[in-house]
Amino acid sequence: MDITSLKAWEMKEKIIKKEISCKEVIQAHIKKIEEEDSEINAFISLNKEEALRKSEKIDEKIKKGEGIGLLSGLPIGIKDNIASKDLKTTCGSKMLDKYISPFNATVVEKIINNDGIIIGKTNMDEFALGDSTETSYFGPTKNPINKNVVPGGSSGGSAAAVAANMVALSLGTDTGGSVRQPASFCGIVGIKPSYGMISRYGVIPMADTLDHVGVFGRDVRDATLILDSLKGYDKKDSTSSKMSNSEAFSIVFEEDKGRNYLDGMKVAIPREYIDLVPADKKVQEQFDKAIKVFEKSGAKIEIVSIPHLKYAAEVYYIIMSCEVSSNMARYDGIAFGHRAEEYETLDELYINSRTEAFGKEAKTRILAGTYALTGSKNAELYQKAMKVRRLLKEDYDKVFASHDVVLSLSSKELPFELNSIKKTSIESYKLNMYSAPANLAGLCAMSIPIGEVDGLPVGMEITGDRFKDRTIIKAGIGYERAVL
Amino acid sequence: MTYKTIIGLEIHVELSTKHKIFCNCPNEFGAEANTLVCPTCLGLPGSMPILNKEVLEYAIKAGIAFNGKISNLIKMDRKHYFYSDLPKGYQVSQAEVPFCDGGYLEIELESETKKINLERIHIEEDTGKQIHSEEEETLLDFNRSGVPLIEIVTKPEMNSAEEAKLFLDKLRATLKYIEVSNVKMEEGSLRCDVNINVVDSETGKKSIIAEIKNLNSFRAVVKAIEFEEKRHIDLLEADKNTEKETRRWDEAKGETILMRKKAGASDYRFVVEGAIPPVRISDEWIEEIKTTLPELPQDKKTRFMDSFGLSSYDAGVLTQSKDLSEFFEETLKYIDDSKLVSNWIMGDVLRRLNDDEIEIQESKLSPKALADLLLLVRDDKINNNTGKKVLKEIFDTGNSPEKIVKEKGLIQISDEGELKKIVEEVLNNNEQSIIDFKNGKDRALGFLVGQVMKASRGKANPQLVNKMLLEMMEER
Amino acid sequence: MISKDQVLHIANIAKLRITDEELEPFMEKFDQIIEFVDRIREVDTEDVEPLYQVNEDNELLEYNETNQMISRQEALQNTQEQKYGYFKILKVVE
């Protein structure tokens, strides 16, 4: 038996029942990483010795019959924009390539407190600015399913690590789809919970009002397991919500096994996707097939209109780049981060350090954000975008008043080839229309695999209302049960 | 030609809360460099600001004390600029929605009470501090980073250095009253920038506004305004108006120096502080804060006028500082004579405090001591002049008035028998004065009283001496 | 169309340098971005309040009690130069 191919919850059961030791689990994963990661490049830094040491402690705990945390010694990968004391936190950037955080993110503390074992920090697009993990200073990550294509991004390292069985579970961040799109590209489950569900303290911000911590697992149950261990209000993060202190979501799996959650579920499908940014034909077919599964299981499908979806990509791009330009301002080469070697004045210290250490995409977005905030553009673009954001949110409020979930594709395209010359046309910006609306409205959303096209995975996005995370988990588990 | 000066002030006040504005690092002055810091006030990646309720309480107190309208929505924004003492590349402040809108303070001019209106008051975080070493390097200390500030922006309604000074005095007194700041300019807990220009009253022509920075004392504010008034008038007269500029006060040279032209300079690119969700605060909470405020100077002044029969001016001076007003009221507990106490405080007590450049609570005079002293004066145990000498002695030594009077034998001689000898002797030695007096020269009486006082070493009861002299001259 | 000067002005505000070779392609890209984002102008937003945060009507306000202080050594551990417990940079001319 290859331990690493088990689902996280299966591994957990075996560890608790002492069928396998935690140390064996960790050793098997480290071996997997040693075999595979030189090619896939999912990790920026690893913590092998510490992981092994911890696994022995967990085994000891289990042996003594002590209480064991929710994550019971499972190997976990963490995106490298999440601050950790033990390993450097680089954000995939030259800017922070030696940066050691003096504090742990709340999610890191929670993993430790829940007896999860952090194997390493995963690769990502620089400062999470990208959708392919190719903008990383530490080189691109390859998709374990097909090494010629990208794993998606920006949390590509975390998605690839789970898909390649190098970890059981992983953490990503999602500002406009950076968990759901790579989950879709790597054929795994990714959940971006509601805004405020998981503390962002210690998560290096890209755009505060859009940033979320998200999770990856091999199935819905896996993703729910780690979600349960992370969620909850945090005094250190004012944007975290007390609404997140709800009962564990995993209760769904325990209450009645095999229940058909799709029966009677009210499903909305926005017509704007089909009208405005139609997906590749074969990809669309997979989506239609998945809808059929919902329908057959008793879900009521309705085509709805979300009028302001039409502008979601634009609103997203403006707000995102404005907040990015702001969050990138602290990287000035003074208290931390890259400092240029040559400069004559303070201004040159700033300019040289930032110009040397930021990649192209980071620079583009900083400049775009600066543009949209300067002078009269502040009102015309930034303030205006926040108004349209409200209109979009209100559109969703209306839909969720009479529907349980919204279904769409996670991405309209298949995983693309590495180094493919990315279209820089308006059409490519439009892609954000698929995943960014959930960030703009703070909705919970999940990407779940629904099939393949040409051997490449396709994912469906299940979106729910704010703090109705349980509903999307039920929809996800319902779908999984229906297609089994 | 006549010119009118137009002055607006921007005042930064550090709030004396226990903790910083967005973290719980202690808000203290003078600690070793970079020892009062955390990820948040250092702006480390991933750190998050938490708006401290205590800061809002302090700020709202100030807003209420300055008669402003407190907003129910507290929203924070980021103001961007790169500078070495600003670790995040932005300062968290308030842009279009300040926590306090409008407001005013009243200042006492000789002829009238003038209302100076405020534009707004907002909260923001302080920056770190830089030290320029002699070895061509700059050292940064972030202990001050994240100390809470309120920025008070006045309307351009002051017309002289004197008015600006009176405004600052009142502002400082009020902030001290409500105990939200140490308001020490020398420690930087109160900082003031001046916006100034002049207008030609006849032609209406205006000079371009200059902003003056680096003012480290109220005296510097006054001097800089006076300097600028003249500079602006010269510019207008030479018809050499410049662009809007920022200047700094050079204390040593006693002049302002151009720092930068303002036009097209800073664009702060305001963005919502996404890590701090806007907070709604209730009217109940604002009311609750209001109840914790002490009596404000303006209210206290009115009460002093009403219940103690003081003049507007006297009441104004006595309520200028909370400590002084409390000293006054405390003294009245021991001696029920508000007029007498007020006169003495307004006169000799304040003069002495001014000379020593200290506050009343720093002096050796206690309310009880002043009351005891005034009781001696009122009951004619000592005369007025002796009282002044005793007061000086109290300030110098802190001894009680009884002790001083006793040890120095200063008790007033009000016994006719005891005084008779002295009066007789003085009359004997000043025949000419008696003649003068009888010839209608009233001044001669004053001279004779003075001679008796001198002979008694100041202890004689002057009223009694007066009476005795008249009687005894009549007899001659 | 965005002008060279505009781009260079923005770059200067953002403290980034754009080389001469980078300038042309960048301007092209920027024009695309501007064309793209400008489309939100057509949305009628009269009487619409900006949405600052998805979870509104926050009444959460607390006294800061979670101590997160770090040692001076930790504060300085990621800077390039330090002296006497201070962060050190070149002489800043005011």
Image: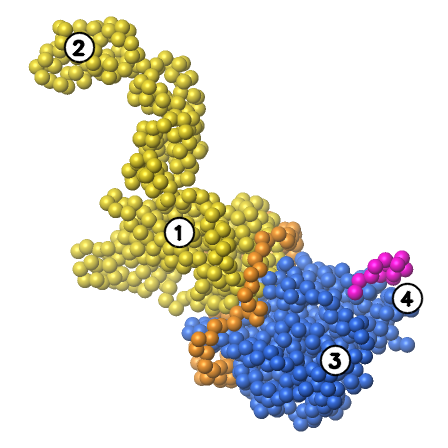
Q: Position of residue B460 (x, y in %)?
A: 28, 13
Q: CA distance from mark 1 to mark 4?
A: 69 Å
Mark 3 to mark 2: distance in Å? 118 Å
Q: Quadrant of residue A119?
A: bottom right
Kindly state the secondary structure of the residue where label 1 is placed: loop
Q: Residue at x 39, y 23 (%)?
A: B372
Disc 4 to disc 2, C-alpha distance: 121 Å
Vertical arrangement, residue B54 with respect to residue A112, above or below: above
Q: Are marks 2 and 1 on the same chain?
A: yes
Chain that the image shows in blue: A
C59 or A96: nearer the eye? C59
| Residue bearing the label numbered 1 | B66
Q: Name which residue type carries label 2.
A: Glu
Query: Which circle's residue, 2 or 1, is located before the other in the chain?
Result: 1
Dot 2, crowdedness within 10 Å: few (<14), some or many (≥20)? few
Q: Which residues are magenta?
A: A56-70
Q: Which chain is orange?
A: C
Chain of the residue where label 3 is placed in the rendered structure: A
Query: Picture coordinates of residue B205 (x, y %)?
Result: 22, 63
Q: Nearer the viewer, mark 3 or mark 2?
A: 3
Q: Tell me where residue B369 sits by quadrant.
A: top left
Look at mark 2 in the image and give the residue it sits on. B471
Is A271 in front, or is A108? A271
Chain B in the picture: what colour? yellow
